[in-house]
Image: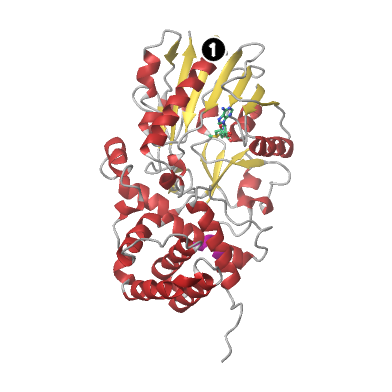
Amino acid sequence: MKKQKNPPGLALRLRAAERLDALLKGANFAPFSSSEIAEGRDRALANRLVTTALRRHGQINLMLAKYLDKGIPKKSGPLEAILRLSLAHLVFLPELGDHSAIFLAVEAARKDTRSQPFAKLVNAVLRRAQGEAHQLRHLPHQALFPAALGPLWRDTYGEDAIEAFAAALLDGAPLDLTLKDNDPDLIEALGATPILADTVRIESRDKPVEALPGYAEGRWWVQDAAAAIPARLIRLAPGARVLDLCAAPGGKTAQLAKAGYKVTALDNDAERMKRLGENLVRLGYTAEIVMADALEWQPDEPFDAILLDAPCSATGTFRRHAEVVWHRSVADIAGRAVIQKRFISRALGWLKSGGTLVYCVCSLEPQEGEAHLDWLSARDDVQLDPVLPAELPGLEAAVRPDGTVRTHPGLPVPSALSGESGTLDGFFVARLVRR
Ligand SMILES: C[S@@+](CC[C@H](N)C(=O)[O-])C[C@H]1O[C@@H](n2cnc3c(N)ncnc32)[C@H](O)[C@@H]1O
């Protein structure tokens, strides 16, 4: 029988390998959109392959170490991505069929001159994995996270944290929306469950975000339930001047506008600021938009409040960005903590006396959150304004005895309807007052 030049499924496999290859080189995960892969089932399959390879990255590391004595061959182009996708398929997505996993991997390797010499190796690795798939499916959950982070998380979040975080990683994140108005008809049309304040949760959906009810009319925006907490902790009268520092793509800007503040949104990333502008137009909110480097910019007059969502390691977002934990080194985290202090110092200088600074990061690392408190307590221009548990109805457990807020993917989220409704991104939030 004549071999087909482009067997069914190969084009999709190549697209998925290309996406995973970019992620292995440091890109951030974004699912394939309908403009990239028009057919819904193909798009879902490509996204499933890439997300499974990403979520199982640490366990796949163990498999590669076992089957490749000398590691991934140098200058082999997409070989690593092809192997990872196929191991993910073979071991964790058996319902897709073993044969296609091996066949498509070999064919994909043959399509690139750099990986083509290793096509036989691909076949050999995958045949071995096929024979051992049952054991591979039970590799330890500790391997799902980098060795440098696991012990630190255990110390910070308790013995059971790794198991809980692993379950959250493998489940992935639901879609959380912040509503402009709490309309029960809209919530029902969305198939959503109210969870906290104006946040609702959609557990599963078969449509892209843009096709959900109310999107085009600007009736809600996508925002994790934990990410919606910091802006709610600014409690000023409408009309107060509030700076959203590090604002793009604008989830918190929208909340501040909804609260009726006079908002200035500042960020230095042009692409992300474009999205912020588009989001505000869709939602019908306004803000003064400033494209500037926060480490150089100076306001004309001080603010009543500043929300500082500082650049951070983002390890708290691993449910939707499984790659982040593998992209960060311990030195990287320490470096970010230094920059965060510079942002905090500058922000304090832009506040009126008595003004509020809400500092937050979507990081699980105490170095980027709790550890800043020691440094802050040594300063005489600022003090902690403790958050009261009653300010976060339903999520009182996230408020620490010192009045800071800590969420993590092991913290259950209450749901008025179903008791518990999954987990949250990891966030640290501290509310401070300028003396
Ligand atoms: C955690 S994200 C902000 C998310 C945003 N607050 C939201 O809720 O949609 C951090 C932001 O900091 C911005 N950033 C990083 N360094 C900056 C700098 N030196 N000046 C201004 N913005 C900066 C990044 O472009 C990024 O958009």
Ligand 1 located in image quadrant: top right
Q: Identify the colour scheme used.
A: secondary structure
Please tell me which residue is depicted at 42% across the width and 7% down the height of the picture.
380
Main SS type for the magenta part? helix
Does the magenta segment cover residue 173? no
- In the depicted structure, whether residue 389 falls above or below residue 179: above
The part of the chain drawn in magenta is: 45-49
Closest to the observer: 52 or 80? 80
Total numbered labels: 1
Please tell me which residue is depicted at 60% across the width and 60% down the height of the picture.
206
Tell me which amino acid carries mark 1. Gly
Q: Can residue 425 be seen?
A: no
Label 1 lies in ligand 1 vicinity (Cβ under 8 Å):
no
Closest to the observer: 373 or 84? 84
- In the depicted structure, whether residue 251 falls above or below residue 130: above
Image quadrant holding the N terminus, namely bottom right
Closest to the observer: 197 or 382? 382
